[in-house]
Image (cartoon, coloured by chain):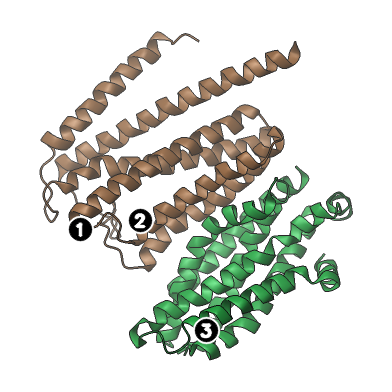
Amino acid sequence: MTEKPTWSVWHWLLGAWMLAVVYGAFFYAPRAQGFVGESARIVFFHVPQAWVAVLAFCVNLWASLRYLVRRDPLDDARAAAAARLGLVFCVLATVTGSMFAKVMWGEFWNWDPRQISIVILLLVYAAYFALREAVADEERRGGLAAAYAALAFVTMPFLVFVVPRIYFSLHPDTLINVRGKIDMDSRMLQVLLAALVGFTGVFTWLYTLEVRVARVLLARRRREEST
Amino acid sequence: MFAKEVRSELRARVAVNAIGLFGLTTLVAVAYQIGPYQIHEQDRPHLLAALLWIILFFAALSGLQRVFVKEEDAHTAKTLRLAARPLAVWGGKLLFNVALLAALQTFLVPLYCILMGMRVQGTLPLVALLAVGCLAMAATATMVAAIIARAAGSGTLFAILAVPLMLPLLVMLIQGTRMAMTSPAWSDILPALQGVGALAGVTMVTSIYLFPVVWND
């Protein structure tokens, strides 16, 4: 499997973009008001990680529904790859959120509704992999995992939007707050948007790699079955 | 399908016995250790609401999965696929699980109020919350039961899949019950009621589309 030259250019561009994001997060964006020390700078990493986790679970749903319609094993592999990456970014968002919590509120874990929500999300998608492990037959595994993924996805808005609004939360306003406005310095907003683009690029790259590996493995298995 | 489920349950009474005895045993253990006098007045709404739903939730988990697992165990699932349309099967199983949970709540909640000294300001809002919560829990449990019935190690898998999916529901139900204990106003319980109702709705709509796929897979 050789890499196309355009892909190589994109990877270098992505690396340069992420370097610029890191530089911007620490040197270009001003210090935020109302936060302890430099703690608010973690927003440039925490928010994109949470966004990518949600994006990955959306991709998981899309691939799962596609699998249910077309029954192509590659779609099942796409769904699993997206869920795996979603879990990784979900863990990263939890860790960076806890670091912020320690600086702002004195403890890594405060049982804040948003902390609880993200842990439940982790459990929901960890269960997705437990289900995949429990079904030996590949076609049945794909179908059942796809059905569970769709069921899991409908609970996500409740975890992300409903539960944190029913309970009192220490968590700062989301990027677009309940008044529908963005209360953020323009330079901070520029860095945050750049970070969102960068992390989405990282996810796209990792996801593409996973799908390419799955495609190769599937092709090899088909070749072995035919001989 | 619902009548068939009831007749089948009345013959063996496995789910009724499992849910009823699990609920009763847990309630006795909680009431004996904590009772109405071990909790400070200001902590009562938080703790009593949480304990009530933990008892109901785990009692429900012990029996709701059986609706599909028993068909696979008894090798009747193939016959059922030929005899009834998938939506009829799903509807019958869902109704049976709703009835089972409603019976559990009718039996356990008054007993819990007496044994734990739980005073409720908004009785009607609580009844509404219990009814919507029963529907939401049964909808999620029925769909997860259909999924795990086709997998290995279905007993363990049911808890692994159902608990995380039901946790947001549980959080909203506990919050709603706490509000019903402290206030008679519908407006206080409404956010939780809306959340639980919406979750029940989206789970049922999703299940209607997904069940035929899972059932015929």
Camera-nearest label, 2 or 1: 1
Residue at figure coordinates x 56%, y 44% from the top left: A128
Q: Which mark is residue B32?
A: 3
Mark 3, mark 2: which one is toward the viewer?
Answer: 3
Distance from the alpha carbon under mark 2 to that under mark 1: 15 Å
Mark 3: which amino acid? Tyr
| Mark 1 residue type | Gly
Chain B palette colour: green
Residue drawn at the location 59% of the way across and 87% of the way down: B111
Given residues A81 and A58, the one toward you in this image is: A81
In the image, which disc is placed on residue A115?
2
Dot 3: what SS? helix
Q: Which chain is brown?
A: A
Q: Secondary structure at mark 1?
A: loop
In this image, B196 relative to B179: left or right? right
Chain letter belonging to callout 1: A
Where's residue B171, x and y in %?
46, 67
Q: Is residue B112 among what the camera can see? A: yes
Which of the pair B157/B97 is nearer the observer? B157
Answer with left or right where residue B47 lies relative to residue A188: right
The residue at the point 79 percent across, 59 percent down is B88
| Chain ID of residue with mark 2 | A
Q: Position of residue A72 (x, y in %)?
A: 66, 29
Give me the disc on residue A106.
1
Residue at position x 67%, y 76% from top? B21
